[in-house]
Structure formats: structure tokens, C-alpha cells
Image (cartoon, rainbow, N blue to C red):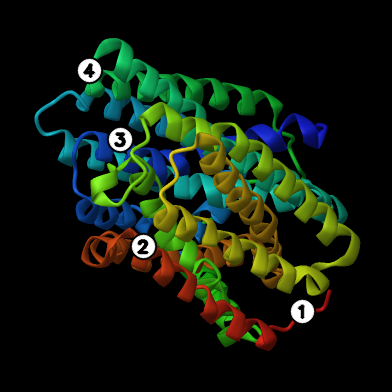
Amino acid sequence: MKTRNPWSWIPSLYFAEGLPYVAVMTISVIMYKKLEVSNTDIALYTSWLYFPWVIKPLWSPFVDLIKTKRWWIYSMQLLIGAGMAGIAFTIPTGFFFQSTLAFFWLMAFSSATHDIAADGFYMLGLSEEKQAFFIGIRNTFYRVAMLTGQGLLVMLAGFLENSTGRIPLAWSIIFFILAGSFIALSLWHKYVLPTPLSDVQRSGVKPQTILIEFGKTFASFFRKKGIIPALLFMLTYRLGESQLVKLASPFLLDKNEAGGLGLETAEVGFAYGTVGVIALLLGGILGGIAISKNGLKKWLWPMALAISLPNLVYLYLAYVMPDNLIIINTCVGIEQFGYGFGFTAYTMYLMLFSEGEYKTSHYAICTGFMALGMMLPGMASGWIQEMIGYQHFFIWVMLCCIPAFLIIPFLKLRR
């Protein structure tokens, strides 16, 4: 067994897991907004990109049975890089919307498969104690990847937009950078990932074996104790965020007459890539430390409030319409800190609920329900916002936080 210090691969692995997700879900939103696609179309079509994460449990048994999770990790990273290169080449074309969406779909399927392998590898490569310790670290670097995408890369895109005067060219360069980054990450992980004894390719795998294991995996998941409140929790914990995340950037970018704050592309990137990064890091690390010391049972309610109540800052921004960047950045920082702290509870709950013989596949099923809870509300969010305006939309977002609070008392937690 080849061992590695977890610090040498967990940060880069979860950075690689988060970066394509933010490219598909967030960078695409900002890019399409700058390319003058409507909010309704942006929310509808980019929310459909959640679909590979929704159905990834259907092929998670194949990842379990075919090849090693280590192989799946660096192979999917290469495929993600190819999808990013395809986007970079087709942005300047006259049919950019259809073609880039096709490559985003390729990235989404590759990224969802990568998630299955990476999350399973995390559980195979670490003891339970280390899993609890590193959960805050892995979530933090996942969020660092997201904020690198929607922060630093968006800032660079804004700089390129202004310096070249060509918005399509600016975004093509961004995706060429992403493509090169993923080739480098694939080579790094092929070298640095450990080789746990339990991460082996199973011998004698036949189609019949896969179907039998597939049936056992799903049947055992839905026989778990407390499955109904667990599923409702997975679907509703991020109900408010699922809609906020699709309209936050358009709100910051839209002109004042449209109800937005009228920020430049680089200013939006700065808000998420500086104050947002620091706040998210603090929230994620503190969340992981809190759970590792006192357990999820003690921290679930505080973390559920932390992921929901800070969304009020967008309601404040929509009504006050400040033009002071310090105020705007502070509001983004508050929301990101709460998100980093509160999301830790969600991840830990999914891992605890997945414990058992098929924990890799069960965790994939859990994240599939999480993605479904993001996809369906997100699809309608752009239409809702255009119907009622940003102010009423953010009131609606706060109301959508209530269902999770009603379900939490019914969850069964041992620790």
C-alpha cells in the first residue's frame, strides 16, 4: 500500500472537484449574462446541467465495480479539461449558446463521475477520525475552487473584457486557462494519490453482477432507517440557496433600472474572490472543527440557521441599493461565512447517513438527491425573478428556508 500525507492530495482533489462544478453552475451564468442571454434562459438551461449529478447514482455502481477509483479520478479530470477546451473554441461562434451548452453537458457528466470516485476514495483512503477532521478542509478547498472560479477568474475575465474590448475573446481565454489547469491536475493526481488496499478493481465482473449489485445498492439505501425525513432534508436544506445562487450574480451585474446593483464583471469577481474567500474559509474550517469536537447532533441547528439567515443580506441590498463597494463586499462576506459554516453540517449528515456496506454508492445517491433539490427550484428561479423583481424574489428565497427547519426535528442522529 502506497501511503501519502492527506494534506498532499485532499486539498487538490477537492479543488479539482469544485472547479468544474463552479464552471458549469456559476461561471456559465456570468458568462451568458455578459453575452446577453436572458435571466429566464440562463436559469432554466444552466439548472438543467444539474441533471448529471441527479442521476449519477445510476452509474455509481459501475464506478465501484469497474477499474479503481484512483483511475476514474485522473481520467475524468482529463475529460473535463477536454470539455473546457471545447467551450473555449466555440464561444466566439454564432451558435455559441447551443455549442457551449453541449460541452458544459460533457463537463457535467465527467464531473459527476469524478465526484463519485473522489468521495469514495476519500472514505477509503482515510480513517473515520481523519474523515471527520478533514471534512472542514475538503469543504474549504471545494469552496476555494468555487470562489477561484467565480472570484479570481471572473475578475480576470472582467480585466480582459475591458482591455480587449471583446467579451467572447475574454471568456475563451478563461476556459483555455481552465483546460490547461485540469491537464496539470490530472497528471498531479496520477502521481500523488495513495493506493489504499481496498481500492482495487474487482475481478470477474459481468453485466449480471453489475445489475445485481445495482439492485442491492438501491434496495439497501431505501431500507435505511429514517429514510423519509432524510430525503426531505436532502431536498430542502438548500432550497433557498438553489434559487439564490442562480440570480446572485445577475443581480450584482444588472443595471439599477433593472433592479440590480450595476457592478462591473471585475467588481463581482472581486466581491467573491477576496472577502468571500476569507469568509468562506473561516466558516468551513470552524464548521469542521466544531463537528469533529462535539458532533453533528449539537451543531445541526446552529449550522442550519447559519446557511439560511445570512441570505437576508441580499434582501437588504435589493431594497437599499448601495453603491458603496465596502458595504456590498461586507454583505457578500457575511453570506459566504454562513454558507461555509452551514454547509459543513449538510456534508457530514450525508456521510453519516451513507455509512454501511455500500457507502460509496449510498453517498452518491445522497448527493443525487441534493442535486435534484438544487436543479428543480433553480430551473424556475429566473422566471420567478423576472415576474416579481429582485426585491420580492429575495423575500421568496427567505421563505424557502423554512421547510428545512420543519424537517430537522425528525432526523435521527447518533452523534
Q: Tell me where residue 239 appears, x and y as whole percent.
A: 47, 69
Q: Tell me where residue 266 appears, x and y as whole percent.
A: 42, 27
Tell me: 188 left or right of 295.
left
Q: Secondary structure at mark 3?
A: helix
Q: Tell me where residue 229 appears, x and y as whole percent.
A: 59, 85
Q: Secondary structure at mark 2?
A: helix
Residue at 76% over, 29% down: 8
Q: Amino acid at mark 1?
A: Leu
Report the residue marked by disc 2. 391
Residue at 39% over, 47% down: 25
Q: Quadrant of residue 243?
A: bottom left
Report the residue marked by disc 1. 413
Label 3 to label 1, Cα distance in Å? Answer: 42 Å
Report the residue marked by disc 3. 31
Report the residue marked by disc 4. 166
Find residue 382 and name its label.
none
All told, the count of numbered labels is 4
Q: Amino acid at mark 4?
A: Arg
Q: CB atoms at circles 3 and 2 under 8 Å apart?
A: no
Foreground residue, 310 or 342? 310
Closer to the observer: label 4 or label 1? 4
Q: Earlier in the sequence, mark 3 or mark 1?
A: 3
Q: Amino acid at mark 3?
A: Met
Label 4 to label 3, Cα distance in Å? Answer: 13 Å
Closer to the observer: label 3 or label 2? 2
Label 4 to label 1, Cα distance in Å? Answer: 54 Å
